Image (tube, rainbow, N blue to C red):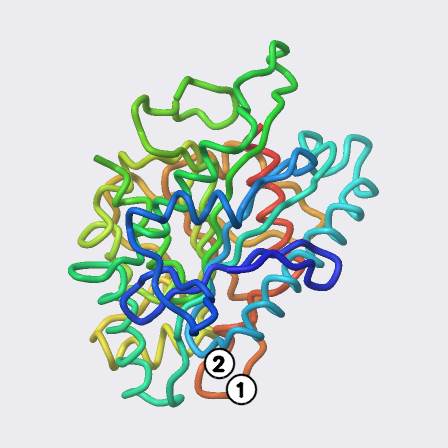
Amino acid sequence: MSGPTYGAHPVHTVDLDTDGWLMENTPTGPRPVTADRLDDHFAEELCPPDWATDLVVYVHGWQTGPESALRAVTRLLDLTAAQYDCGHTYSHDGLYPGLRPWRPWTVLVRWPSRSLPSLGGYRRIRDRAHAMSTGNGHAARVIGRLLGYLDAHRGDPSAAPVLANREGQYLHLVGHSFGCRFLCEAVQWAADAPVTLGWSAPEPPGRPFTVDSMLLLQMAAPRDAFATTFTALAEAPLRGPVVATYSQHDRATGFWHLRAEKRAGVGYAGIGTAPAPVSSIRMLRADEAYARDTLDHRFVSVDASDVFTRGNGPAGAHSDHLRPESAHLLLSLADHSR
């Protein structure tokens, strides 16, 4: 775990091993952090600063090494910064009137996701992601404890006396590919604080943390995963929606996923069945505002087939998610959380 400024943005890294344990560097080499030391370790390494308006936790996906993960999350942060600046020029009030300002503080969760770009490689990382976050794996509990720590140490968004202008820090989860599974498992693990403004769903009391939005970019999971695997998300500690993008140019969750799991993935065909109604919308241009009622649903499936189009290799457009339109969607979710 570390907390450097990478590029123009502070990015703190959290590294997991193949069993899902958090790793720390010691004089004798990397070693897992035991469960009883997790909170102390987070307290030593992570401290959300007062200047941050939003906390972002990002989990990368398939075929992403440690440096590639840093580059990806930094690119997304660059895009959100540029989009935020542009958003003030699109209309009198701007695209994000609730974001005054937007100052994210980011934690990047890294895990061993590299394999051969083949069907066997896809299955290997699929099985690893599943094993790390379920059964004897520890990723869901570790990330869940991370979210609980961040929730406990962020400014309370419900503390402001003026209802139209809540103060505090908002917590957003962003995943790509298999990284989406880790986030879903972590939030679901916590499914077994006061009501605030923002989304229509109230904050359930007595939960270990509450998440303001979850953006799943090109999720590598079957279309019915929310109805068969992540069934507790309908009652999970989420104030805002679960938003998943998809593109029919994504060969990883189309071609490879279809052959590995006999059905198309969320990243190719969108969310199918779920334990709550699914709202289906198209991804908007970076200068088009998302109305609150288009996003204020438990599950939102976003068709990005006209946006995520680049990529001629085995994965197709699976990694074409680092676009201004994605930054616009993230900022819109953050804005509507207010």
Contact flag, marks 2 and 1 (Cβ < 8 Å) = yes
- The foreground one among 312 and 112 is 112
- Examine the image and state in which quarter residue 55 appears: top right
| Vertical comparison of 129 with 139: above or below | below
Q: Residue at x 62, y 70 (%)?
A: 71
| Vertical comparison of 206 with 249: above or below | above
- Pointer 2 residue: 316
| Vertical comparison of 144 with 222: above or below | above
Residue 221 left/right relative to 99: left
Residue 142 percent coordinates (x, y) = 33, 52
Circle 2: residue type: Gly
Tag 2 secondary structure = loop
Q: Residue furthest top?
A: 161
Q: Residue at x 42, y 79 (%)?
A: 251
Distance between the alpha carbons at the discs numbered 2 and 1? 5 Å
Q: Residue at x 71, y 31 (%)?
A: 97
- Pointer 1 residue: 312
Residue 70 left/right relative to 24: right
Q: Residue at x 43, y 73 (%)?
A: 28
Q: Residue furthest front?
A: 27
Residue 333 percent coordinates (x, y) = 55, 40
Circle 1: residue type: Asn
- The foreground one among 49 and 234 is 49
Dot 1, how many residues are within 10 Å of its Cα: few (below 14), some (14-19), or many (20+)? few
- Residue 35: which disc? none
- The foreground one among 215 and 49 is 49
Residue 148 percent coordinates (x, y) = 39, 38
Dot 2, how many residues are within 10 Å of its Cα: few (below 14), some (14-19), or many (20+)? many
- Of the 4 image quadrants, the one containing the C terminus is top right
| Vertical comparison of 123 with 283: above or below | below
Residue 17 percent coordinates (x, y) = 35, 69
